[in-house]
Amino acid sequence: MEQPSCIREFSRYTVLSVLGTLGVSCYILADTFFVSKGLGTSGLAALNIAIPVYNFIHGTGLMIGMGGATKFSVCKSQENQVLVDKIYTNTIYLAVLFSIAFMLPGFFCPRQLAFVLGADMTILEMTTIYLRWLLLFSPAFILNDVLLCFVRNDANPQLATFVPNSVQTLQAAQTP
């Protein structure tokens, strides 16, 4: 069996990552368009106030996923299956722990969080609704990021490129 060159392998991963990112960017653009058409400037303002919370959720998922998947790949290359399994399991546990930490404000204080983020009385209710849904679905967002990192590092970048767009479409259907 012939080994692919490093440059070819790097190019394949890079192109597929860029395509996945472009897909997510198109989703965000479409989401913003429909929010502005459906809810007007107040809806866009509420979205822009709430979106930094999503960035924290997404950043947390990527941080956990990339760290765990990197360690996973190193141990996998050393053929240490026991440690590979342990790393994967502990990464999932950590993702669940952070998911719970994000979900709790979604249950108990989304209104207070919206106010802290800068929502005034005209957009407070819309921002609260948006934050509630973002925070309550944080396990889906975080586990999506974690699993994509592991799939990508498990020698299947094509799957990691096409799955996020499907997940993002499902998430868009669930957000208000």
Image: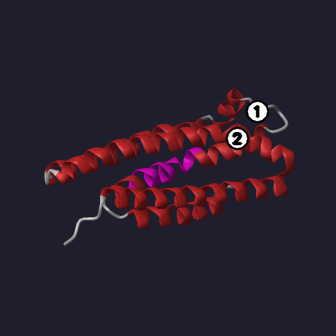
Per the image, is 136 magenta?
Answer: yes
Residue occupied by mark 2? 128
At a point 49% along the width and 54% down the height, the residue shown is 140
Q: Is residue 103 visible?
A: no
- Element at badge 1? loop
At a point 59% along the width and 61% down the height, the residue shown is 23
Coordinates of residue 59 in the picture (x, y in percent)? 50, 40
The type of residue carrying mark 2 is Thr
Q: How many C-alpha atoms fall within 10 Å of the one at disc 1: few (<14), some, or many (≥20)?
A: many
Residue 158 shown left or right of residue 78 in the figure: right
Residue furthest out toward the bottom: 1
Residue 73 shown left or right of residue 117 in the figure: left
Quarter of the image for the C terminus: give it.
bottom right
Per the image, is 160 magenta?
Answer: no
Compared with 96, 33 (above or below) is below
For the residue pair 173 and 77, the one nearer the viewer reads as 77
Q: Is residue 53 visible?
A: yes
The total of numbered circles placed on residues is: 2
Residue occupied by mark 1? 119
Segment colored magenta: 135-147
Coordinates of residue 89 in the picture (x, y in percent)? 27, 49
Coordinates of residue 2 in the picture (x, y in percent)? 22, 70
Q: Disc 1 to disc 2, how far (Cα)?
A: 9 Å
For the residue pair 176 and 109, the one nearer the viewer reads as 176
